[in-house]
Image (cartoon, helix red, strand yellow):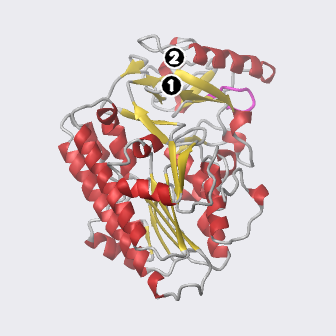
């Protein structure tokens, strides 16, 4: 039995969530004539800008959005995290997410969930009726459950992700074509399982939006060469969301949301090089490649995006900062970050967040001591190779930002206000009449 075979009114309310990774609210709200379906959704329901999380990076954002708790509870802080008590690092996957996902709560309530293309969900869970893992999956072959899903997706030329290497070419035509092909197949898959599955919660993510933003966003904001192609791509996204909305029965509430905002990128800032040049970081080798190459005298090191760790005695294997000097050293680093200026004299950092103000939970032992939230235009990098310059430019012209995150709820009774990502999971559960304990979440229902 599929979704549309149900007798209306016989079942509990349902929710369809469509993620639009990295789409800023301003892009949609300031161009309602270009994106009529999103404008109609806002007019019929509730829409607003919300805040992302610290740090505003997809690998940390999606675990928090889908659980309603901060990285101190999910255990995922970014694309790269470090092992407790070592300098070893790893790329967090779905199995590293330590908090309960919203679809698990739905399943535990005796309801059914279909989950497609959500970042940081590999390997696919087998306790939901259907899951296709998203970003960070090695390939479709092992990313789809049950196994017969793969055959159908193969017939669509479905891809886990766009090929980002194409975006590095000066000529972006191949990248743009690949982005369209990727999102076309994603839409067809979403539409198929919208209709095929008997779901109570459908949770799917368009991540191609984030990829397009990374390589074309400045073209949009500053009237660049590919502005028309950028707008055309987003008109396709708008059309697909409108078509998906049209298929939904009346007892399904549609939520559309991004995980962070986006802005133009002017400079990449290589913070481990900055730390090295300013006496905070030393390497044991002339060609460092990883965190384990740092020298004993190192006082601090960095991970993307803008995460800073004090090389603390007793916590790091070769810690050089005594515990009784921790506060003073951290304050010193924070002050230097806040004072840092870019090539044109603009502040690089908008604000610096201390760990106690952003992270709490059973997994805050690997939390960064400081997180720098960049000013618009400065993308914070942290490679371990000694870069020749702190400020560089590259093929990307768009970057994440904390503000301007999108949230649309097809319910006029929702009140978004000063919402953030943590509010989305409890709102979904409230819409579905799934009972939950408010104290389990860092957010609250927006109903």
Task: Give the main secondary structure, helix, strand or loop, of the magenta stretch.
Answer: loop
Q: Quadrant of residue 98?
A: bottom right
The image shows residue 44, relative to residue 30, as above or below, that is below
Label 2: few (<14), some or many (≥20) within 10 Å? some
Among the two numbered marks 1 and 2 on one chain, the one whose residue lies closer to the N terminus:
2
From where the camera sits, is residue 101 visible?
no
Proximity of marks 1 and 2: CB atoms separated by less than 8 Å: yes
Residue at 32%, 69% in the rendered image: 188
From where the camera sits, is residue 9 visible?
yes
Residue 256's spot in the image, x, y percent? 49, 57
Residue at 40%, 16% in the rendered image: 389
Residue 365's spot in the image, x, y percent? 71, 41
- Marks 1/2: CA–CA distance: 7 Å
Q: Which element carries disc 1, helix, strand or loop? A: loop
Q: Quadrant of residue 127?
A: bottom right
The image shows residue 83, relative to residue 13, as above or below, that is above
Where are the magenta residues, as a range? Answer: 309-316
Numbered circle sitting on residue 115: none
Q: Nearer the viewer, residue 270 or 360?
A: 360
Is 328 displayed left or right of 157 in the figure? right
Residue 178's spot in the image, x, y percent? 24, 52
Q: Is residue 227 magenta?
A: no
Q: Which residue is mark 2?
A: 347
Question: How many callouts does the rendering have?
Answer: 2
Residue 384's spot in the image, x, y percent? 47, 28
Residue at 35%, 69% in the rendered image: 189
Q: Nearer the viewer, residue 84 or 351?
A: 351
Q: Which residue is mark 1?
A: 375
């Amino acid at each position: 039995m599929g979704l549309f075979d149900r007798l209306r009114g016989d079942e509990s309310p349902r929710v369809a969530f469509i993620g639009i990774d990295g789409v800023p609210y301003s892009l949609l709200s300031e161009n309602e004539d270009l994106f009529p379906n999103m404008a109609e959704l806002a007019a019929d329901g509730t829409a607003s800008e919300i805040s992302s999380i610290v740090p505003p990076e997809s690998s940390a954002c999606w675990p928090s959005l889908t659980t309603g708790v901060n990285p101190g509870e999910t255990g995922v802080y970014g694309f790269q995290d470090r092992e407790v008590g070592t300098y070893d690092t790893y790329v967090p996957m779905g199995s590293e997410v330590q908090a309960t996902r919203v679809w698990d709560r739905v399943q535990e309530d005796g309801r059914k969930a279909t989950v497609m293309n959500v970042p940081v969900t590999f390997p696919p869970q087998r306790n939901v009726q259907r899951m296709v893992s998203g970003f960070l999956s090695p390939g479709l072959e092992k990313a789809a459950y049950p196994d017969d899903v793969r055959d159908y997706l193969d017939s669509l030329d479905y891809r886990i992700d766009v090929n980002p290497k194409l975006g590095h070419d000066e000529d972006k035509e191949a990248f743009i074509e690949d982005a369209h092909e990727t999102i076309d197949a994603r839409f067809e898959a979403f539409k198929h399982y919208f209709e095929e599955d008997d779901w109570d919660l459908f949770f799917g993510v368009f991540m191609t939006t984030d990829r397009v933003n990374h390589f074309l966003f400045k073209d949009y904001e500053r009237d660049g060469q590919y502005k028309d192609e950028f707008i055309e791509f987003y008109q396709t996204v708008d059309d697909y969301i409108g078509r998906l909305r049209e298929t939904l029965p009346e007892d399904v509430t549609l939520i559309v949301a991004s995980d962070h905002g986006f802005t133009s990128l002017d400079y990449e800032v290589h913070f481990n090089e900055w730390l090295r040049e300013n006496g905070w970081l030393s390497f044991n080798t002339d060609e460092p490649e990883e965190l384990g190459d740092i020298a004993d005298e190192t006082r601090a090191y960095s991970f993307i995006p803008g995460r800073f760790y004090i090389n603390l005695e007793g916590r790091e294997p070769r810690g050089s900062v005594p515990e009784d000097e921790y506060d003073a050293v951290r304050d010193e680093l924070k002050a230097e970050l806040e004072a840092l200026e870019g090539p044109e004299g603009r502040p690089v950092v908008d604000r610096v967040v201390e760990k106690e103000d952003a992270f709490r939970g059973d997994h805050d032992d690997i939390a960064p001591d400081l997180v720098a939230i960049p000013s618009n235009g400065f993308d914070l990098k942290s490679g371990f190779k000694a870069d020749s310059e702190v400020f560089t430019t590259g093929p990307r012209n768009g970057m994440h930002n904390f503000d301007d995150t999108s949230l649309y709820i097809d319910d006029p009774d929702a009140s978004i206000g000063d919402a953030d990502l943590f509010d989305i999971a409890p709102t979904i559960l409230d819409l579905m009449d799934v009972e939950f304990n408010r104290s389990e979440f860092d957010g609250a229902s927006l109903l």
